[in-house]
Image (tube, rainbow, N blue to C red):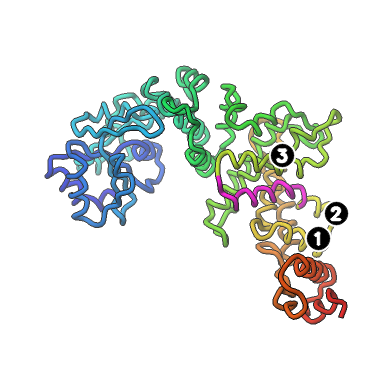
Amino acid sequence: MLEDITSMLQAIKNAGGTAYLVGGSVRDLVLGKALKDLDIEVHGLGITDLEKILQSFGPVALVGKQFGVLRLHHLDIDWSLPRRDSVGRKPEVMFDPTMTIEQACRRRDVTMNAMAINLHEHEKIEAAMRKGFFEEIIIDPYNGLADIKNKSLRAVDAQLFTQDPLRFFRVMQFIGRFEMIPDDQLETICRTMALRDQQTHQPLARERIFEEIKKMILKSCRPSLGFRWLKKIERLHDTFPEIHALIAIQQRADYHPEGDVFEHTMQAIDAAAQSDYYHETLWGAAEDEKFLIVIGTLCHDFGKATTTDENLHCHGHEEAGVPLAQKFLKRITDDLFLSKAVSKLVRHHLAPFMLLREEAGAKAYKRLAAKLAPEVTMRQLGLVALADYRGRNGINSQPLTAHQEKFDQFINNAEQANVVHQAEAPVLLGRHLLDVVQPGPQMGELLDKAYNIQIDEGITDVDELRRRVLGE
């Protein structure tokens, strides 16, 4: 992508500015990850000057301008200015073009994000790219390179770190995403820091927390590491109480040799995160499906916290888990579709392999698909059931890789019933009854009755279904 902006970098240099690749872009370069977007910080120019330069190359988005961030519509690049932020939920932003790159890096959260590359050193960058060795071109005032090598998360500045409570959740997702370990100082900071705005004392906006959870789930092979860390520093109870409630809820060893429900859930979400079955659906991209399945798996046994008895039976935990899952999700998002979908995954997560044990026929598969529709497919429910079964490793914390044959058989049976990706469409519709009944509860009852007859008896003739439900 850098070759696409050579002329822009030259224009910035001609105007007296210096452009640096900063933050996560440098970190991902060091880690050998693909750069999907870039963060470029421009020193030595004011916001108006930078905007004029960028406008000569195309339309500039003004969203984020108040924070010193500009964006050209055709490039996945955030162009920013060095700034000093006041404390608070809505910080006063003060641009400082004279700030050194070392000073600018100091306001970053952890050292692996506090590195930079001078983008005007073309020859050095090209040589480093050829060799795959970037240490010589990286500005690293806080030893981020060493911390990456040692897989250590370390705060750049302890005082600045606590000014933004979102950084607590960023550490959580970094742990899961990069499988790095906070050093003692950062762990102490996170164990005690307030998770509210320092000035208004208001809690973090749930949307901000949700985005960190989403990053951890979508970009981690082991998202459990983030939640396990919260448990370790005793912050799980005040961040995600529904997950904390699973700790020490014991299970029958013959079904769950891995231990308590928390351990089972952690292994299960890792199994879901490591699956490669996700793809684009009618409702969104493959990553949307992955997020749904991992979140559904995270919530699937919430009900065991309230239903497990002294004999370690947990009858009805599927139903009991639905309101708990909804409460959990409401705390982090207002996405009603997600809430409905997760609720159905929780309510029916035992059904796939239960149908296999019962050797159920096509009718049972069709009924289940109808209960899941329209938010959830049979395939998606099968993925949650598979993750559930794989979260039962009694030897270590890694999920199992077994039970593939059960998932394949469930999908095969659903295919035979033609309901893998959607429920069977009803034959009798409201328009077929308008001459005898108006839309409302009575029509709904008749349509439900017709659909049950259609599934139970395989009747697909509109006139026959109409006669059956109307008694004609």
State whether the magenta stretch is mostly helix, strand or loop. helix
Give coordinates of residue 56: x percent, y percent.
18, 55
Is residue 121 in view?
no
The kind of residue tagged 3 is: Asp
Name the residue beneath numbered marker 3.
301
Which residues are drawn in magenta? 334-351
Give coordinates of residue 35: x percent, y percent.
37, 46
Name the residue beneath numbered marker 2.
358
Mark 2 nearby-residue class (10 Å; few <14, some 14–19, many ≥20): few
Q: Give above or below for 124 relative to 146.
A: below
Dividing the picture into quadrants, the one containing residue 165 is top left
Number of the label disc, if any, that sits on residue 41: none
Q: Is residue 350 magenta?
A: yes
The kind of residue tagged 1 is: Ala
Q: Give above or below for 340 relative to 243.
A: below
Number of the front mark, 2 or 3: 3
**Left or right: 11 in relation to 215:** left
Q: Does the magenta stretch include residue 395?
A: no
Number of the front mark, 2 or 1: 1
Question: How many angstroms separate mark 2 from mark 1 (CA)?
Answer: 10 Å
Circles 2 and 1: CB atoms closer than 8 Å: yes
Name the residue beneath numbered marker 1.
364
Mark 3 nearby-residue class (10 Å; few <14, some 14–19, many ≥20): many
Of labels 2 and 3, earlier in sequence is: 3
Of labels 2 and 1, earlier in sequence is: 2
Q: Residue at 16% across / 40% down in the picture?
A: 17
Secondary element at image label 3: loop
Secondary element at image label 2: loop
Of labels 3 and 1, earlier in sequence is: 3
Quadrant in the picture for the C terminus: bottom right
Question: How many angstroms separate mark 3 from mark 1 (CA)?
Answer: 23 Å
